[in-house]
Image: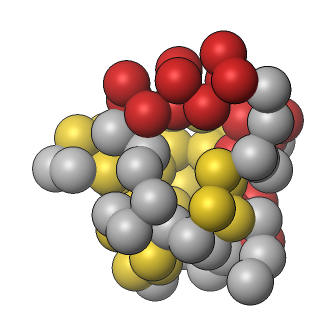
């Protein structure tokens, strides 16, 4: 297991755990980051990640991405 920030670009990853405070978990859940779901890192720009989750492209901060364990 590793944080999403360490995932390779273009590789499909399985979300195993979402850490952080309750409001952070809820926020990420609303964006589609749920345990058991898949997430793919599309690119990284200035430390922020562009990811593909549930057929949507979403930009998230490195801080948020570090809370998502794959």
The extreme left residue here reads 55
Position of 58 with respect to 1 (left or right) is left
Q: Position of residue 33 (x, y in %)?
A: 43, 45
Q: Position of residue 23 (x, y in %)?
A: 66, 16
The extreme front residue here reads 22
The structure residue drawn at horizontal position 32% and vertical position 51%, both measured from the top left corner, is 53
User: Please, is residue 20 above or below residue 21 in the view?
Assistant: below
Q: Can I make out residue 61 in this image?
A: no
Choose top left, top right, bottom left or bottom right for residue 61. Answer: top right
Q: Can I make out residue 64 in this image?
A: yes
Choose top left, top right, bottom left or bottom right for residue 69. Answer: bottom right
The structure residue drawn at horizontal position 38% and vertical position 29%, both measured from the top left corner, is 31
The structure residue drawn at horizontal position 80% and vertical position 36%, both measured from the top left corner, is 20
Q: Position of residue 39 (x, y in %)?
A: 41, 63
Position of 65 with respect to 47 (left or right) is left
Q: Position of residue 9 (x, y in %)?
A: 55, 73
Here the colouring is secondary structure
- Which image quarter holds the N terminus? bottom right
- Which image quarter holds the C terminus? bottom right
Choose top left, top right, bottom left or bottom right for residue 17. Answer: bottom right
Q: Nearer the viewer, residue 7 or 26?
A: 26
User: Please, is residue 38 above or below residue 33 in the view?
Assistant: below
Q: Exactly how many numbered labels are in the figure?
A: 0
């Amino acid at each position: 297991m590793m944080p999403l920030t360490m995932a390779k670009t273009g590789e499909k990853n399985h979300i195993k755990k979402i850490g952080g405070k309750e409001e952070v978990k809820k926020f990420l859940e609303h964006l589609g980051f749920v345990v058991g779901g898949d997430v793919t890192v599309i690119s990284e720009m200035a430390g922020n990640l562009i990811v593909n989750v549930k057929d949507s492209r979403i930009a998230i901060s490195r801080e948020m991405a570090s809370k998502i364990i794959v």
